[in-house]
Every structure is written in structure tokens, then in C-alpha cells.
Image: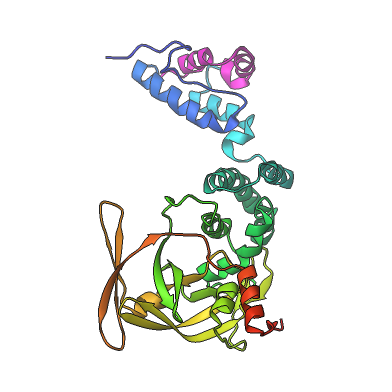
């Protein structure tokens, strides 16, 4: 039994907004489902006339003027194809310009992106235009990345290069980062002090390093162990400046880590891990325990319905095990100011690493 066609003002009726060309194919699909339920989908002439009843007056007059509408020999599919020719935005053939990308960037520059929610909103709008420009061959991945980072505060932009290396250390020099890779790093940076404690994207553990308490981020997706320059200075660790690694920023520029601190002792309860730690300049964290830490300590996690998480570690030398709770991420405890004060107290000037 067929279903009566809904009236235009009914909730179930197909709807088309001529200002949003991209939704025209969806309108046709909805109309065709409605027409099939009403039993008219095999009658092209009736299909062409019926679809007009779901349009505004201006659009209806235009569709009526098309040659395939008046020609009884033309099918519904041919009528639909002619319509789509006049709506390039519906078929993805409309050429996107760099100016459109710049407009998106400038809009969010005025708003200031300071939360992960604002980042997500920006990324959704930017990604649509960027994909079209990439497909057209208008902009390269590096140029797209340069536009992408512009709305972020300077405090975030200055840390993106280090963050990209930490998350993607196998990326070759000169190889462009995608905006999805950059977004992951910016999400990490935005979850710093400005993020609420309940934002549990990253879990951390408390450790004793060189006899002092420290807050360490757990990130199994990171292939190295990292400490900030400020933390290194406060703890007074020596590092080998000949063991620097190359860091590549979002815009394709390169920089270097400061060096490698060898056999840094991390104590967790009764077990100790001696880790090889890269020192980086001004990141948004004190320490990151990456994949090498998890492998060395045979780390295993246990999650609970309450949201709690326990981490079990095994000392690679004594084979002792310890289980410690993980905790939500906190802001960095050590800043540049802290490291300068510590150097002054010790009476040792800070050395600059040649670039």
C-alpha cells in the first residue's frame, strides 16, 4: 500500500535550501524515497512535477525553465542531472580559493583559540576548505599547515615544533605534517593549565627523580622520553649536547633538541628506571614517559569502572614490582623563571647550546 505524499510544510517532507548547494544530493535522495513510498518513482513526468512542490518560488521557476522539464522524452535522471549542472557546490566541482581559507583563519584569529572545543570547531571549518585546495593542487601541505597554525596564541605556536617531534619522531626532515597531526599536538598543549582537571585526555604518575618529586605524563604513543629545559636546569642534570635530535615545526622549519641526559634515575615506589631523556626547550610539560619507558619497565595498566587507573612496573634489574595509581594531568611545575633562580642560587651561569 502506497504512502500519501507529505505536504511541503510537514516535518517528513523533503527540504532544500538553495543557499546550501551541498545538500542538494541529499534532497534528491529524500525526495526519491518519498516518491517510492508513494508509488510514483517509475513515472518521470510525475516525479518532475511533484518535486517542484517542495521548492521555494524562485527555485521552482528556474527548474521549470529547464529543457528537460518540458521534454516528456527526458527521464527524471536526466532532469536531475541538468539541475546539478547549475549547482557546482552540490557536486564538489566548485573551485575553492585561498581567500576562503584565509577568511576561516582570520575569523578564528579574532576569536582566539584557547580551548579544545574551540580548536575542534576551527578544525572542522578549516579542514573542508583545505581538502578542496589540496585536491585542486592550489596549496601544498606545508602551506596549508602554515595557514592552520596562525589563529593559535604565540604561547602555543612556539611549542608546536617540539610537540610534533615528540609525537612523530620518525617523520623525515622536510616531510610535511598534516593538519590532523598538528591538531593532535595543539590539543595536547591546550590541555595544559587552561584545561580543567577533569579533562582526562592524559594520565600521569608521580615519581622521585634525583631525590625530588616530579610529575610525569604517560604517553605510549611517544617513541622517546622527554624533559623540559626548565626541569633539567632545576634538577641540575647534565646532558650531552652532541646527542641532539632534529625537530621539525609545522611550517617545515627545523630546530634541535638541546641534548641527551643519560641514565636519569626515575624512582616509582620500590623500583628504579634509568632512562635516556631528550631535553627540549620550553614545552608544556616537565616530563613525558614514552614507549621506551613502558618497554623497559614492562608497564601494564588496569582500568576501573570508577575511572581510576593503576600502573604496574617491574624493575629490570631486581625484578621487583610495584603498582601505583595514575592521576589527572597537572600544569608544569617548573618554568623558565624557576630554572634561572636555581642557577643564580648555585652561582653557575646557564650555558647556551650553539645552533
* Residue at image location 66% in from the left, 53% down from the top: 153
* Residue nearest the observer in this picture, 164 or 43: 164
- Percent coordinates x, y for residue 95 in the rendering: 68, 42
* Residue at image location 60% in from the left, 24% down from the top: 18
* Quadrant of the rendering where the C terminus is positioned: bottom right
* Residue at image location 56% in from the left, 43% down from the top: 121
The single residue placed furthest to the front in the displayed view is 345
- Percent coordinates x, y for residue 36 in the rendering: 37, 21
In this rendering, position of residue 131 left or right of residue 200: right
Where, by quadrant of the figure, is residue 322 drawn?
A: bottom left
The magenta region covers 42-70
* Residue nearest the observer in this picture, 61 or 273: 273
- Percent coordinates x, y for residue 238 in the rendering: 56, 87
Our reading of the magenta stretch's main secondary structure is helix
Please, is residue 138 above or below residue 333 in the view? above
- Percent coordinates x, y for residue 253 in the rendering: 69, 69
* Residue nearest the observer in this picture, 31 or 166: 166
Please, is residue 278 above or below residue 122 in the view? below
Amino acid at each position: 500500500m502506497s504512502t500519501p505524499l507529505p505536504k511541503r510544510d510537514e516535518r517528513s517532507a523533503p527540504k532544500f535550501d538553495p543557499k546550501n548547494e551541498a545538500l542538494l544530493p541529499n534532497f534528491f535522495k529524500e525526495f526519491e524515497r518519498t516518491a517510492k513510498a508513494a508509488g510514483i518513482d517509475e513515472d518521470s513526468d510525475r516525479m518532475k512535477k511533484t518535486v517542484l512542490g517542495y521548492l521555494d518560488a524562485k527555485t521552482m521557476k528556474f527548474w521549470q525553465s529547464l529543457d528537460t522539464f518540458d521534454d516528456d522524452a527526458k527521464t527524471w535522471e536526466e532532469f536531475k542531472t541538468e539541475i546539478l549542472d547549475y549547482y557546482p557546490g552540490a557536486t564538489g566541482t566548485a573551485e575553492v580559493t585561498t581567500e576562503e581559507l584565509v577568511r576561516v583563519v582570520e575569523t578564528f584569529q579574532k576569536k582566539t583559540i584557547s580551548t579544545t572545543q574551540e580548536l575542534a570547531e576551527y578544525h572542522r571549518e578549516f579542514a573542508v576548505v583545505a581538502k578542496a585546495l589540496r585536491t585542486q593542487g592550489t596549496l601544498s601541505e606545508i602551506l596549508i599547515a602554515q595557514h592552520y597554525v596562525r589563529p593559535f596564541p604565540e604561547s602555543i605556536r612556539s611549542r608546536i615544533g617540539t610537540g610534533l617531534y615528540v609525537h612523530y619522531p620518525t617523520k623525515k626532515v622536510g616531510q610535511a605534517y598534516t593538519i590532523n597531526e598538528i591538531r593532535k599536538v595543539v590539543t595536547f598543549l591546550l590541555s595544559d593549565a587552561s584545561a580543567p582537571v577533569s579533562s582526562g585526555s592524559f594520565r600521569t604518575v608521580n615519581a622521585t627523580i634525583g631525590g625530588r618529586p616530579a610529575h610525569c605524563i604517560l604517553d605510549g604513543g611517544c617513541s622517546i622520553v622527554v624533559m623540559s629545559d626548565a626541569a633539567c636546569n632545576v634538577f641540575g642534570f647534565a646532558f650531552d649536547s652532541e646527542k641532539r635530535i632534529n625537530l621539525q615545526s609545522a611550517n617545515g622549519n627545523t630546530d634541535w633538541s638541546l641534548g641527551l641526559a643519560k641514565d636519569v634515575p626515575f624512582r616509582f615506589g620500590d623500583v628504579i628506571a634509568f632512562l635516556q631523556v631528550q631535553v627540549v626547550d620550553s614545552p608544556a610539560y616537565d616530563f613525558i614517559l614514552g614507549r621506551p619507558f613502558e618497554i623497559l619497565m614492562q608497564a601494564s595498566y588496569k582500568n576501573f569502572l570508577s575511572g581510576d587507573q593503576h600502573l604496574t612496573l617491574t624493575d629490570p634489574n631486581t625484578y621487583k614490582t610495584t603498582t601505583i595509581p595514575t592521576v589527572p594531568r597537572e600544569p608544569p611545575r617548573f618554568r623558565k623563571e624557576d630554572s634561572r633562580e636555581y642557577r643564580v642560587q648555585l652561582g653557575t651561569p646557564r650555558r647556551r647550546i650553539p645552533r
